[in-house]
Structure formats: C-alpha cells, structure tokens
Image (cartoon, rainbow, N blue to C red):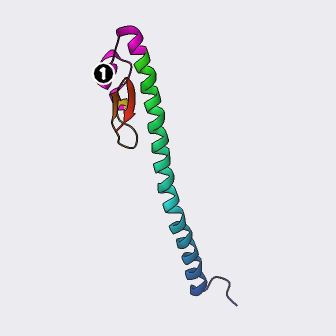
Amino acid sequence: MKKGFTILEMILVLMIVTVMILITIPNISRKRQIINDVGCRALVEVVNGQILVYELNNGDVSSVQQLIDEGLLTPQQATCPNGQKIVIEHGQAVAR
C-alpha cells in the first residue's frame, strides 16, 4: 500500500487554507485604517506641541508652513499617515 495523500485530501486542505486567508485579509486592512487614524491623532498632538513652542518664541502662528520654516516640523509632518493635511485653525492643529 502506498503512503501519501489523495487528490481529494489535498483539495480539502487547500480549501481550508483559502477560507482562512479570506477571513484574515479584511481584518488586516481594517487594522491598517485604525493604525493610520491613531497615527494621525498623535501627529496632530505633536503639531499642537510645536505650535506652543513657536508661540513662545515668535508669537502667533497661522500656518503649518511657518512651523516647517522655523525647523519645528519636517515637510512630511504636514500630512497624516491616512492622507489628511494638518492645518491650523484658531491656534490649534486639526486634520482635514
């Protein structure tokens, strides 16, 4: 008698693996969105901190570009991981 798997057993195993992958992929993409949103909120808080530093040194700030020009932020920090732009409204950073 030969040892090994039949074609039916191999197809069954492949079907189970496929179902597991199809269940996992949506969870991964949902987690990525959550991570990007949390990262954006954290970046807004960093910008708010840098607004305070700028105001202590120079007075009122009206744009993120002023913070970049002063060296308090990098150009990459003007955009959230989820693609939203950081803007300053009423002295506070917000993502739009």
Relative to 74, is 70 above or below?
above
The quadrant holding residue 73 is top left
| Residue located beneath label 1 in the image | 62
Label 1: few (<14), some (14–19) or many (≥20) C-alpha neighbours in 10 Å: some
Q: Quadrant of the C terminus?
A: top left
- Chain part drawn in magenta: 53-76
Q: Quadrant of the N terminus?
A: bottom right
Relative to 24, is 7 above or below?
below
Residue 9 coordinates in the image, percent (x, y): 61, 83
Residue in the image at 30% along x and 21% along y: 62
Q: Residue furthest top?
A: 57
Relative to 45, is 25 above or below?
below
Residue 30 falls within the magenta-colored stretch: no
Residue in the image at 45% along x and 44% along y: 36
Residue 75 falls within the magenta-colored stretch: yes
Q: Residue furthest front?
A: 90
- Decide if residue 38 is on the left or right side of residue 12: left
SS of the residue under disc 1: loop
